[in-house]
């Protein structure tokens, strides 16, 4: 129904359409349309804000719905016609901005950020993520850019679980554009670790063979290529060698500040020992040279 009204709004926002939109958006979380919308969404996503069958879309206002669907015309008009709590949260702790950012609705994000009373750093209660974290995780680079250009957005804020930073999350998901934008900022700490095992974004990328991410991170001044994790005391080179990521090993060895003989603290194994133990003979040859 919101999409239907939005279609009419694009052809011209009359007073009748405005009243229809407001009527539908009032107490929207009690409408069957909201339940059907989010039920369908719940079955097509993974690791996103979601609603259990017991709780339902409580607090999912009409503004949430319009932001979720990206209906620019309705959001613009209803914000002028009614005093909405723009930071109101639904039963997942998500604001309208959270939904818009996570779903890549950049025009909605722009409209909401123009409001002085919007909180761009509000975390949801389900995952402890800000709108910017959702945009980075989902790879919506244009939304990331819009949010980072807005004053007061915290690029070093961490998720509640494991204390993952935005940069770490971008590295984990191979979001190259988001990583580049974050690294351009002086207030982003590229060596910040997560609490689970003390890995930096570089350590994780090296371990998992994310060569392009490793390259981007190494180009940033101040990145420590020898920083060890807290679980095994291994460097990025050790992890890359252990898992046979020859391209990453080559990039790391090309730097003059990488120690190729640094042993881990858990077992006293060097990158060469780890490569040999796992049968990565190409990496062994590279290290011996």
Image: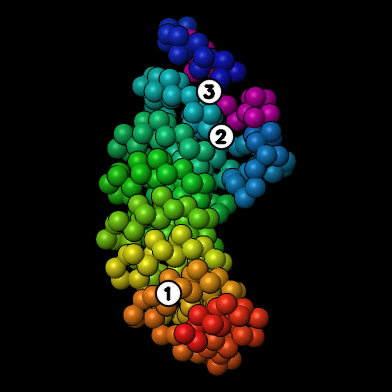
Q: In this view, does 234 lie above or below 108?
A: below
Q: Residue furthest bottom?
A: 268
What residue does disc 1 label?
A: 252
Residue 25 marker: 3
Query: Can see residue 2?
Result: yes
Give the class, few, some or many, for how many residues have Cα within 10 Å of label 2's Cα (few <14, many ≥20): many
What is the C-alpha distance between the residues marked 2 and 3? 10 Å
**For residue 174, side relative to residue 42 (left or right):** left
- Does residue 34 belong to the magenta stretch? yes
What is the C-alpha distance between the residues marked 1 and 2? 48 Å
What residue range appears in magenta? 17-37
| Disc with the residue nearer the chain's start (1 vs 2) | 2
Q: Give percent across and percent down for residue 203.
A: 48, 72
| Disc with the residue nearer the chain's start (3 vs 1) | 3
Q: Which residue is drawn at 49% across and 63% down?
A: 211
The kind of secondary structure element at disc 1 is: helix
Q: Which residue is drawn at 56% across and 83% down?
A: 284
Q: Which of 80 and 246 is in front in this view?
A: 246
Residue 60 marker: 2
Q: In this view, does 76 lie above or below 190?
A: above
> Looking at the image, do the residues carrying marks 2 and 3 touch, with CB atoms under 8 Å apart?
no
Residue 51 marker: none
Question: Nearer the viewer's eye, disc 1 or disc 2?
Answer: 1
Q: Which of 263 and 182 is in front in this view?
A: 263
The kind of secondary structure element at disc 2 is: loop
Q: Give percent across and percent down for residue 68.
A: 53, 32
């Amino acid at each position: 129904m919101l999409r239907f009204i939005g279609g009419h709004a694009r052809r011209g926002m009359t007073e009748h359409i405005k009243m229809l939109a407001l009527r539908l958006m009032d107490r929207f979380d009690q409408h069957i349309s909201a339940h059907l919308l989010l039920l369908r969404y719940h079955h097509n996503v993974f690791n996103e804000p979601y609603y259990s069958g017991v709780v339902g879309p409580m607090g999912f206002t009409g503004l949430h719905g319009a932001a979720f669907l990206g209906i620019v015309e309705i959001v613009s008009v209803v914000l002028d016609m009614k005093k909405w709590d723009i930071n109101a949260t639904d039963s997942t702790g998500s604001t309208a901005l959270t939904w818009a950012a996570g779903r890549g609705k950049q025009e909605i994000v722009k409209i909401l950020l123009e409001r002085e009373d919007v909180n761009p750093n509000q975390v949801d209660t389900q995952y402890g993520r800000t709108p910017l974290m959702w945009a980075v995780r989902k790879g919506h680079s244009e939304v990331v850019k819009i949010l980072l250009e807005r004053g007061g957005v915290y690029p070093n804020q961490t998720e509640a679980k494991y204390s993952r930073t935005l940069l770490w999350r971008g590295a984990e998901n191979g979001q190259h554009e988001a990583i580049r934008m974050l690294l351009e900022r002086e207030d982003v700490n590229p060596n910040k670790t997560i609490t689970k095992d003390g890995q930096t974004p570089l350590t994780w990328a090296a371990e998992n063979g994310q060569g392009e991410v490793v390259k981007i991170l190494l180009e940033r001044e101040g990145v420590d290529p020898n920083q060890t994790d807290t679980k095994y005391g291994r460097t990025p080179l050790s992890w890359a060698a252990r898992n046979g990521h020859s391209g990453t090993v080559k990039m790391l060895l090309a730097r003059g500040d990488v120690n190729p003989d640094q042993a881990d603290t858990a077992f006293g194994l060097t990158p060469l020992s780890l490569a040999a133990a796992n049968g990565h003979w190409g990496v062994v040859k590279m290290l011996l040279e």
